[in-house]
Amino acid sequence: MTSLLIRGGSVVRAAGDERVDLLVEDGVIRDVHVRTAAPPKLLSADNTIDAAGQFIFPGFVDCHVHFREPGMEQKGTMESEAQSACAGGITTVCDMPNTRPPTVTVSALREKVRGAEKIDVCDIRFFFGVTKPEHLTELKNLQKDPSEEAGMLRARCCGVKLFFDHSTGDQKAATKTIRETFQVCAELKIPVVAHCEDAGINAKAAKAIAAGDASAHSLRRPPEAEKKAIASAIELSSTFGTQLHIAHLSTAQGLLLIRQAKEQSLPITCEVTPHHLFLSTEDYPALGTFGKMNPPLRSPEHLEALWGGLEDGVIDCIASDHAPHTSEEKRSGNPLDAPSGVPGVETLIPLLLTVAAGKWPHPVAQSLSKKFRYADIGRLCFKNPNRIFALGKRGIEVGAPADLVLVHPEEMWTLKGEELHAKCKWTPYEGWNVTGKATVVGRW
Ligand code: DOR
Ligand code: ZN
């Protein structure tokens, strides 16, 4: 038996922080002794961490990543990107289906699950993709298969991903298929995650703006495209009763629609990415194609609206949409043809910790005044994604696996792509100073 004692750290709970001594034995939390006025209980263990002045969180969840394996290993592998997640305090991720082959069949899901079994620093779950009606047949077969193996695959599958327009991997589904997917997923009680950009509006805008530098990308995929696709997705969720999660919300208009849908108690949730919270179209001169992603960067008013949505609770999760590409791929050719996507799984928590510490990490853009606390990070990056995707994480309680993160709230450091663990070795936040470091403990 191996044991670990974490002494005097504060568990961050919505109701207030709790100073505890936490005993872990063989990877399981055995005791959570709350320190009150009484002297600390005498616990002992093989190893002790003095966590005074540190916060203890459950391992964070990033419910939107692209780990690129199989088929795009030059951009990242499950191993490299899982190391990156872990180095950033994230121990559970939900991986998207736009790999090669895409995760649109049971056998492709099986291959990914097999690959993930070899990774021990991160629990990788998978979204099933649907681009054609036959993929729904595959999904139905998986749901009704009574075998033990199918049960194991279902346990690793966190929902269905639908693209309303093309992005990396060309997974846009036809309108009819989108409708059918909402219907089938309602029957199967599976959440649908929607990439909401209307293909027609984007196509028209791209035709009108045929050339330009990277900043033209935001004009070629305008806010109205997101608004229209979110409206359609909400309508479909309302028609069939489908659990709907809007991925990477990026506009004020989209936020308003989600707020209204929630007021009507529709089963709708949403996430926002760090790049839409910290970067805007004003960053194009510095970033060029390294600031190109889908949905694209928006003007600062949208960024401000998204922080408002976090503050009033309409936004449920913050997820990285970690989508690495090599710097060569980003640099070569016409900027408008450069692949869309930025890495972010390792920088997500440090950026949020910086805001919780009362600082604004962007070196140039003006700070917004925000009420954002450490407990909000626990809610947005653990509690809510765990609930929405039924990930089954137990958090910090006796008997639960010791999936823990220690946060040093005052540690100041600088983000440098070369020092991060993602295979691509670059970050859109190069040189940014952050305050707060998250270290995974207890997983062994
Ligand atoms: O920017 C993006 N990159 N958006 C997506 O929808 C896909 C992603 C990727 O896989 O590169
Ligand atoms: Zn994505």
Image: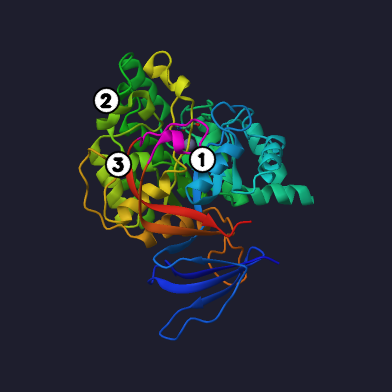
Cα distance in 3D space between marks 3 and 1 = 25 Å
Q: Nearer the viewer, mark 1 or mark 2?
A: 2
Residue 433 in picture, x, y percent from top left:
32, 44
Name the residue type under label 3.
Gln
Q: Do the residues under discs 1 and 2 have CB atoms within 8 angstroms?
A: no
- Along the polypeptide, which appears first: circle 3 or circle 1? 1
Residue found at x 28% / y 35%: 280
Residue in the foreground of this view, choosing between 49 and 320: 49
Q: Name the residue that disc number 1 marks.
A: 65
Q: Is residue 1 above or below residue 326?
A: below
Residue at coordinates 36% horizontally, 26% vertically from top-left? 201
In the rendered image, which quarter is residue 31 located in?
Answer: bottom right
Query: Mark 2 — residue?
Result: 285
Examine the structure image and report whether residue 418 is included in the region drawn in magenta. yes
Q: Which mark is residue 253?
A: 3
Residue at disc 2, secondary structure: helix
Residue at screen point 51% across, 40% down:
65
Disc 1: residue Cβ within 8 A of ligand 2's nearest atom: yes
Which residues, given as a range, are shown in magenta? Answer: 415-430
